[in-house]
Image: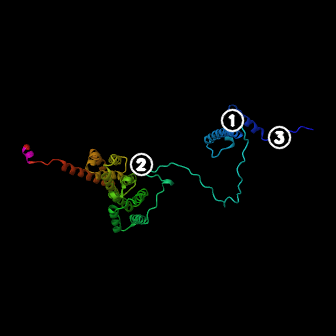
Amino acid sequence: MAARKPKKSASSLVHEWAKVVCGEANEQLQKASPAMRVEEIATEVALRVETRVRSLIQTAHRRRVGRRGEKLSVEDINGALESRGEPSLLRGSAGSRELDLKKLPSSSSPPREPSLALHWLSVDGNQPETAENDLEPMPREHELYVRKVTETIKGGESDERKLVFRSLRTADGLAGVAPALIKFCTDETRRKRSEGTLRNVVAALRALVLNRRARVELLLHDVLPAVLTCVVAKKLNSEVVREEAARCVADICEEFGDKYATLRPRVAKTLADALADDKPMGTRYGAIVGITALGPLAVATLLIPDAAALADKLQTKDHADARACSFALLQAILLYADHAAAASPKPTTMMIRRAA
């Protein structure tokens, strides 16, 4: 009769692994009492098994993090075993679950996993235009106010414009609508609208600058370039718009020049560069009226040293723009002369006697 093969209670792989575990615990088991209970032996073996399994999972987890995977894979487990000098055990995975394409559109989408992202709330007082920085909608009354102002600036009656400019200059609570109004005005200056529209836009900006409750200070990086463009623009055939913009620039320097030390020097440099010989006459006219609006000290620094040479060059050109520049230069010189005469000491009786 043939001998029966011994019945295996577990796979040879598990048996070999169990022998390794029991071999490591053999030293402690020999020191234990011969009457040690089976429960205590099982507890000791369980602790060993848990320690090895935990260490193996932690090593596999570090490999998953290193490859930036979302779940543990067969390769992670085998890599952890190979790093310990043990043979790999797993040969493959079950694979992805098959999906029915007909049922997929009607099924609910899985929830998005929570994630973190960084973005700038503001940069130098300017809020970047990102989805995370979406502005809250304005109240209904603010929307109506902005719509009325913009419509009046584009083509309202004279009396309506005066009321709007007065409101922009004196009304309270304009801090909430000032960003929208300034954005509208700066966009209009870029589009090179008609003379009447540009003049109204500059007048509206000037009214907002003079209204301290509108808090235009945080929006100067948008207001000043737009107004300076109207002063020294190359393609602008309107002396009235340049003069109104020059007064607005002077008001900005008057209101905020003490708070920002570089404001006046930057404006002065822009106007001085616009006086160069290669600039068109319209740009030079804007520079002259802009410097004049800044006051007699600016005239003394930027215009008087080169006034004679500039006047000689303007006399050689016989057209309307050159005559306008000459007249503006004359007005600037008269302003400086009046200031110098007022600043000089008046002769007294004692000075007259000494002169005699």
Residue behind mark 2: 124
- Give residue 258's position: percent from left, percent from top: 30, 49
- Give residue 224's position: percent from left, percent from top: 37, 52
Tag 3: amino acid: Lys
Residue behind mark 3: 7
- Disc 2 to disc 3, how far (Cα)? 80 Å
Q: Which residues are magenta?
A: 349-353
- Give residue 235's position: percent from left, percent from top: 40, 54
Q: Are marks 3 and 1 in contact (CB under 8 Å)?
A: no
Choose the circle earlier in sequence order: 2 or 3.
3
Badge 3: how crowded within 10 Å, few (<14), some, or many (20+)? few
Residue 88 lies in the magenta-colored region:
no
Q: Secondary structure at mark 2?
A: loop
Closer to the eye: label 3 or 1: 3
**Residue 305 in the figure: left or right of residue 164:** left
- Give residue 263's position: percent from left, percent from top: 34, 48
Residue at position x 78%, y 38% in the image: 12
Q: Nearer the viewer, residue 337 or 39?
A: 39
Residue at position x 38%, y 67% in the image: 156
Q: Is residue 39 above or below residue 166?
A: above
Q: Nearer the viewer, residue 260 or 300?
A: 260
Instruction: Give the quarter of the image for residue 151.
Output: bottom left
The residue most toward the right is 1
Quadrant that contains the C terminus: top left
Residue 82 image label: 1
